[in-house]
């Protein structure tokens, strides 16, 4: 069966510091991968998605970036965090080949920028 | 613009039935998803509708009317563990998932 991991689970970072969040998927090959952010009381905001190694699509202009160095690894980064970057970051995967497929979420990383 | 509307919060009694509505205006339609999200946790998949009608899955059912831009999630025989937020999401013509803000369901004994 497929599993998706994210770490760290929680993170407290000062403004201006760098960020690296990691997501890995097991039990599937060439998945579509997604990074979302969820602010309190708000819907999920798609940040990035990837259909393959090195292929990243950005949905929202911001100070975040994403990379996919391996088939089942997706990384969210920032060089300098802003207060507005605080939120719940979720990684998700779906079966490749079709965006009709259900997305399955990792446990999430709660980020607090102070 | 694209918009998904759901009630912010609903309250129901253990053992009862509750219907959570979702209306949408999107550029195209390629299906509608319902997810459950317990506080502090990730969303988990409940249902997917792409054709009109009712899909039943145990205590949960989901209904879709594409002509009305409307869906509902029906929860029967409510249990305390059903207390969670329920997220409606629509796949638009570009195959992007547009998410509602979610409905927080509070179950009282």
Image: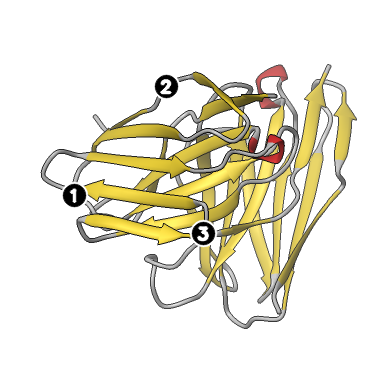
Marks 2, 1: nearer the viewer: 2
Residue at horizontal 66%, vertical 20%? A84
Q: Which residue is mark 2?
A: B7
Q: Residue at x 23, y 56 (%)?
A: B53
Q: Quadrant of residue B7?
A: top left
Residue beneath disc 3: B58
Report in which chain the residue with disc 2 lies. Answer: B
Distance from Cα at disc 3 to Cα at disc 1: 30 Å
Q: Which one is in front in this view, the residue at disc 3 or the one at disc 1?
A: 3
Residue A93 percent across, percent down from the top left? 59, 64
The answer to whether marks 2 and 1 sit on the same chain is yes
Asked if the residues shown at circle 2 and circle 1 are in contact, with their CB atoms under 8 angstroms apart, the answer is no
Residue drawn at the location 42% of the way across and 42% of the way down: B74
Helix, strand or loop at disc 1?
A: loop
Decide if residue A105 is on the left or right side of residue B3.
right
| The C terminus of chain B sits in image quarter | top right
Q: Which residue is mark 1?
A: B28
* In the image, farthest residue toward the left: B67
Q: Is residue B91 visible?
A: no
């Amino acid at each position: 069966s497929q599993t998706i991991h994210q770490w760290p689970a929680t993170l407290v970072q000062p403004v201006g510091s760098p960020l690296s969040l990691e997501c890995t998927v097991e039990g599937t090959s060439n998945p579509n991968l997604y990074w979302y952010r969820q602010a309190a009381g708000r819907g999920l905001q798609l940040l990035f998605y990837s259909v393959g190694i090195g292929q990243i699509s950005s949905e929202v202009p911001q100070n975040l970036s994403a990379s996919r160095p391996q088939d089942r690894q997706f990384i969210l980064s920032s060089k300098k965090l802003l207060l507005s970057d605080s939120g719940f970051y979720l990684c998700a995967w779906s079966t490749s080949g079709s965006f009709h497929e259900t997305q399955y979420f990792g446990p999430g990383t709660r980020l607090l920028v102070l | 613009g694209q918009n998904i509307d759901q009630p912010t919060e609903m309250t129901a009694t253990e053992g009862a039935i509750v219907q959570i509505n979702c209306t949408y205006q999107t550029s195209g339609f390629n299906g509608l998803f319902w997810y459950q999200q317990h506080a502090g946790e990730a969303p988990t998949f409940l249902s997917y509708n792409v054709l009109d009608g009712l899909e039943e899955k145990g205590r949960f059912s989901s209904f879709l009317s594409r002509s009305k831009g409307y869906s509902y999630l029906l929860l029967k025989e409510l249990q305390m563990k059903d207390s969670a937020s329920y997220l409606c999401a629509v796949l638009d013509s570009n195959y992007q998932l547009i998410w509602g803000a979610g409905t927080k369901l509070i179950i009282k004994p």
